[in-house]
Image: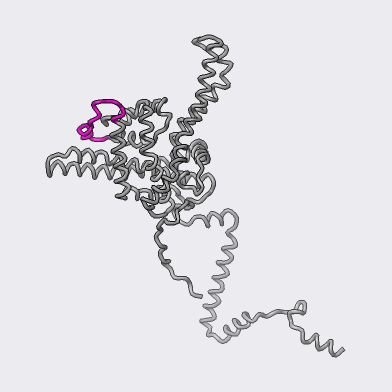
Amino acid sequence: MMNTEAESTEKSPESTPGAPTISLASEQNRCADESAPAGDVESHRDRESSRRDASDAKKMVKGPEERLFDKVRTWVDVFPWLRLVRVCRVAGGPVWLTHCFLVFAVWFAGAVWLTQNPEHVAFDSDLQQPMSVRSVLGLAIGTVASPSDAFIPRLPFANEWTGGLPGGEFLSQRWSWVLVVWTIVLWLPTSMALVRVGALLTAGRDTPSYLVTFGDAFRRIGRGVLVVVLPTLVATFFAGIVLGLNWFSNWLGGPSDVGNWANWLTLPIVLPATLVAAVLILGGRIATPLALASLMVEPDPDPLDSLSRGYEYTLRRLPQLVLLIGVATVISAVVVSAWAAICRVGGSLCGVVSAPNPALIACLELLPAVVAIMFLWAMTGGIYLLLRQSAGGQEVEEVAVASDHWKAPDLPPVQSPPTV
């Protein structure tokens, strides 16, 4: 009996139900408060009260508000299209500018010669005429070539875009197969490299290396050709169905101005096939560049997956796509206008200081078009990342980067960590 009482008295207060518990930390804080001056005790109590208020405020923010506040870190989280401003750095790269100018000069000379117009074979004197805004847009869009250009004429208002540019009428006509192949061969590697540069700049990374970027482009050049050619092949298949059924219905029912019974009988097949072929060709003007961007951005690119992404973003997110194209056009117009002003001042100086130099004046007139082409392809990479973020929630910063890609080291934080 005495042993039982001794054991019960030796038990700690924690084992007794309902007994008050006193922690060592609280006891030390109480002793420190009793031994500290009154002013220190008041300041300590104020700090404890502010901590409790902050903790209560954090507990009040729950649900969708908490997720919204966590995601909004900078202005680009509120206005994602501000990321496209970073693409302006591509216009200041001398290596990229020189490369695109040389490619453009060779392409334009070959395109004018392939039009088989003798008066534009020697175009050195004709290019002295000032280039208009419509001609700059026409030449930039002309680099987006498709095999469908060989049997379907360009849009009717393309002739207005190229007004005032000698030799530019080939953009408003149905291209020859030689001209289509010439444009694809010459511009496809450069366009693939530029979309990758634009995507990396939009993602907040540094300008990639020239050699590394073109190495990536040439490793994927075969899949890039498939991306460019495949929409036209599929559209040709549906167009063949339409032509075959039209021929069969006319042979079966006989020609008629209002259509025979066989034409109306085959209409449920002919009409959808015609619309599918038209969507593939017209939508491919935008879907193909977006597919090339997917090919150069994703870590494991696939031509079919890239094309499906391009057409999905073009057709299902058309309002957002138009908005991003408008923002990219405004940003590009500012930089291209600045380059045009520089070239205009440079051309005036050439006439004042010395005798006019036709070759120099021609290069100055073509330089704004080169900058516009660079922006067209680089902005495509940035627009693709923004559309991908909107469609699947994937972060813009998630871009496949080679292991030898140089990245600037992170800057140290401005604020020092709080001391405990």
- Give percent across and percent down for residue 374: 35, 43
Residue 290 makes an appearance in the image: no
- The residue shown at (41%, 54%) is 205
- The residue shown at (43%, 34%) is 285
Q: Nearer the viewer, residue 298 or 317?
A: 298
Q: Is 23 placed above or below 198 here?
A: below
In the image: residue 17, left or right of residue 381: right
Q: Nearer the viewer, residue 174 or 23?
A: 174
- Give percent across and percent down for residue 389: 50, 47
In the image: residue 268, left or right of residue 90: right
- Give percent across and percent down for residue 202: 42, 50
The question of residue 124 being in magenta is answered with yes
Is the N terminus in the top left, top right, bottom left or bottom right quadrant? Answer: bottom right
- The residue shown at (52%, 37%) is 316
Q: Is 347 placed above or below 251 here?
A: below
Q: How many marks?
A: 0
State which region is magenta. Answer: 112-131
Q: Nearer the viewer, residue 39 or 11?
A: 11
